[in-house]
Amino acid sequence: MLIDIIAGARPNFMKIAPILHAMQARKDSGGPLHWRLVHTGQHYDPRMSGEFFEQLGIPAPDVNLEVGSGSAAEQTAGIMVGYEKLLLTQRSDCCLVVGDVTSTMACAITAQKLHVPVAHVEAGIRSGDWTMPEEINRLATDAVTNWFFTTSEHANTNLRKAGVEESRIFFVGNTMIDTLLANMDRLRAPDVADELDLQPGGYFVTTLHRPANVDSTEGFSRLLQAIGDGTRGLPVVFPVHPRTAKTLRALPGFPANIQLVDPQPYLEFNWLVKHAKAVITDSGGITEETTVMGVPCLTLRDNTERPETVELGTNVLIGTDPARLGPALDRLFDGHWKQGRIPPLWDGRTGQRIVGHLERLLG
């Protein structure tokens, strides 16, 4: 049985690695599944993509659709045209998509229109915020999914409320955490750790890219000032997302303790997170990793599609008002941050569970 595994952007790479490794292990012992790794080219920086693939032990893609940059509509159209041509040339038995990027939605719709069943890893998560492109991708993907692999009971509940039959929902855990646990002993300090003389627990990490936070120069400037003031002079390591860099260039300045660095490879970035005093972010995936590593996390959003990181983990929703950041950081410095615990099935064996289900569903 041939399964297409779709990867389009860097967040996808961490999610497919455990599935590929589990499939290879089963194949080596006589398992029935074969795969075709399809890179859509949605994010294809050869240096960064190559480093992620090498660090995570992901084989070179079998197919690269090379869609390149463009608007969301242009990328969606390019991916759908390219993937349709591939399926018409050699049909697969299943299209497995992960996460919530444009490639996830585009390939799921294309496969389903050609009557290729779709399996969605990280199905059912919802922020309820339709201004987020990712939320639209989640809704559209799950609307055409056959088999739903979920990370939490929250996701299961969302799918049930949408009318998905229980027999199509598989609570398997979190492949992002599979990758993190498999590589925890391999994390390594980036060059900036020496350059900035970073000490364990003596610096912060921040990542910002949501439009609500970074698209307005005035709002972004206020937010950076709040981060600089609230972190009490400790270094703030800020790997800069392309969206963020565009606004940064228009700012008159920002606090001196905020240190801008290039985007970091997987092992180096998570070393920074593991040893940080806390993470300040508007990302979703990072909140999962901080929860497992026990690192305090302050999320600059009004909602989250990963509520388990708030209810069980180390994450706290601060909101997008910069005035709320200072009091939260004061609680952190005063030692009043919650301990947190790891959500169920975030145990490093999610990839194996997914492959087991796929063998039964397709076999």
Image (cartoon, rainbow, N blue to C red):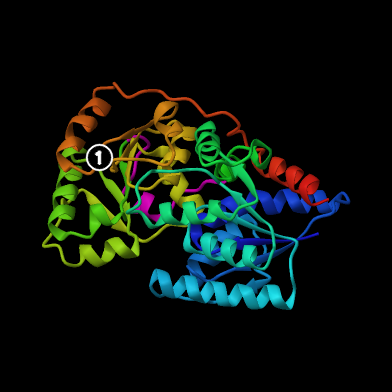
Q: Quadrant of residue 64?
A: bottom right
Region in magenta: 185-201
Residue 222 position in % (x across, y down): 13, 49
Nearer to the camera, 190 or 32: 32
Residue 148 position in % (x across, y down): 62, 45
**Callout 1: 10 Å neighbours few (<14), some, many (20+)?**
some
Secondary element at image label 1: loop
Q: Quadrant of residue 144?
A: bottom right
The reply to whether the magenta stretch includes residue 199 is yes
Numbered label tally: 1
Q: Which residue is mark 1?
A: 319
Which residue shows up at 46% across the image and 46% down it? 270
Residue 135 position in % (x across, y down): 42, 52
Which residue shows up at 59% across the image and 48% down it? 121
Residue 217 position in % (x across, y down): 15, 60
Vertical side of 311 occupied by 194: above or below: below
